Image (cartoon, rainbow, N blue to C red):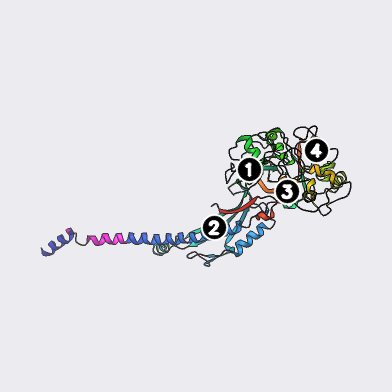
Amino acid sequence: MMIRARLSTFRHTEDGSILALFAVLMAVFFGILALSFDFGRTAATQSEMQSFADNVALAAAGELDGSADAINRATLAAQTLVTDTQTFGTGPSGLGFDDLTLTFYTTRPDAFTAATNAPRAARFVTVDVAPRAVSAIFGAAFSALSGTGIDGAKHVSARATAGHERQVCDITPLMICAPAAGIDVDASVGTALTLDVSVSTGNLVPGVIAMLQPVNEVAPVIDALCGGLDGLGLDLCQIAAEGPRASCYDDTSAAAPDNLLDLEVDSALNVRFDIFGGAATGLVNNPLYPSAPNILNGFEPSSGQCIADNPQASATVMGLPGDDCHTSGVCSFVGNGEWSAGRAAYINANYGGTDPHPDATSRYDFYLAEIEASAQGGSATGGVLGGLGGLGGVVADITDSILPSCTNQISADPARRVIVTAFVDCSGGGINASVDTLPIIDYAEVFLLSPAGLDATGSVQVEILGGLSSDPQNNVTNARVRPVVRLYE
């Protein structure tokens, strides 16, 4: 009876049941702890590899400045500037160039973007870090106890994309549709372009010059220079006025203008030549719209002293020529930089056959030399030119053609006839205002050789002076370039 009573008591007692529950809970607790430990090892390795990828991407993107050796320099930067370590992944603890792959792109990469090997076009880089396996302590223990052979190891990798963009400030908001094959601005210094300013539809084709509408505007377009203006008046001010512009744009893409006829580009450009026609008629003698200190252009008014809308070819002087192939009609709107025949004609027409500036190799150099020489005329030229100093020897009969006869406002800046413009890829065909973006190839300074739209072709000729430098002292104008390198993913 005593044994039976004890067995019954043992069967019904609850003493010690908490120990069983504690054992179960402890197993769960240590399981969670083990899983957390495994997760932490994986997350730490992922973080280390992502940090490595981010830093390599930034280092490589910093070299993608559009130069001929950009990809080589970007690769070298990725190879030598950044190293890192990982703690828990398989293989060596060090992370270096052998662990990553670089892929370069022209535009910010997506699933439909093709890679590029063209150094001048590459502006974005994607860095892929080879995966590392991170062993799971809990998974290994479970594998050993269960005999499943599944160790629970996790494979982690990293990817980063960075881009090199530029913010371009204090520019003339104009764009030139580049040739179908694009254009290397720095290799085209001294080349003349014949550009169409008489577009009558919304279509943009290579050779057209039009108002620039950047997709991303970094700073407001309405600044102190053009404050209080809007519409046509604002556009005219942005292109024709002289003074600092607070506006900054990125260098990735532009929008097709809604209507190319909203602004008379020719009227805005011609202010620099002492020509105030069309939308610029009321700007005569306005100090915001001075002429250049040298307006020699080969046109004269049919009557009165202002050319305005009634020009005729001058019988006494000639303006700076385009390239010889333009004159002969054997090249497209892009010349070849050769202007020896045009130079001879210019010297014969204006200087009686004797070259007063033989050291001036480009048309812009010749223009500057004429300003310097005109200043030596002292009281004969007067005004702002009297204090410029220079080379001397100006031919008297062209002095009046160098100075304006319409406005009483003359700029003291020889670069008044230089504009900064975006070269845009319009090669897609059928481009019009329904197209959202057009890739910007480069920003460049160009020198206005002639007034716009005064001849029967409705064109303007310019000479390429070169791409914008990141050092403002190397730019003819006061345009500023600010490099911006950033991560995107």
Q: Where is residue 130 in the image (x, y as percent from the top left)?
A: 55, 60
- Residue type, mark 4 in image: Phe
Residue bearing mark 4: 299
* Apparent side of residue 7 relative to residue 88 in the rendered image (left or right): left
Q: Residues within 10 Å of mark 4 (few under 14, many from 20)?
A: many
Residue at 54%, 55% (x, y): give it. Answer: 159
Q: Mark 3 points at which residue?
A: 414
The dot on residue 254 is: 1
Mark 1 or mark 3: name the one nearer the start of the chain.
1
Reply yes or no: does residue 23 show up in magenta.
yes
Amino acid on which the number 1 mark rests in the picture: Ala
Of mark 2 and mark 3, the one earlier in the sequence is 2
- Taking the view exactly as shown, the residue that stands out farthest to the front is 379
Residue position marked by numbered label 2 in the rendering? 54
Q: What residue type is labelled 3?
A: Pro
Label 4 or label 1, whichever comes before in sequence order: 1
Residue span colored magenta: 12-26
144 up-or-down from 339: above or below = below
Find the distance from the CA under tag 2 to the CA under tag 1. 28 Å
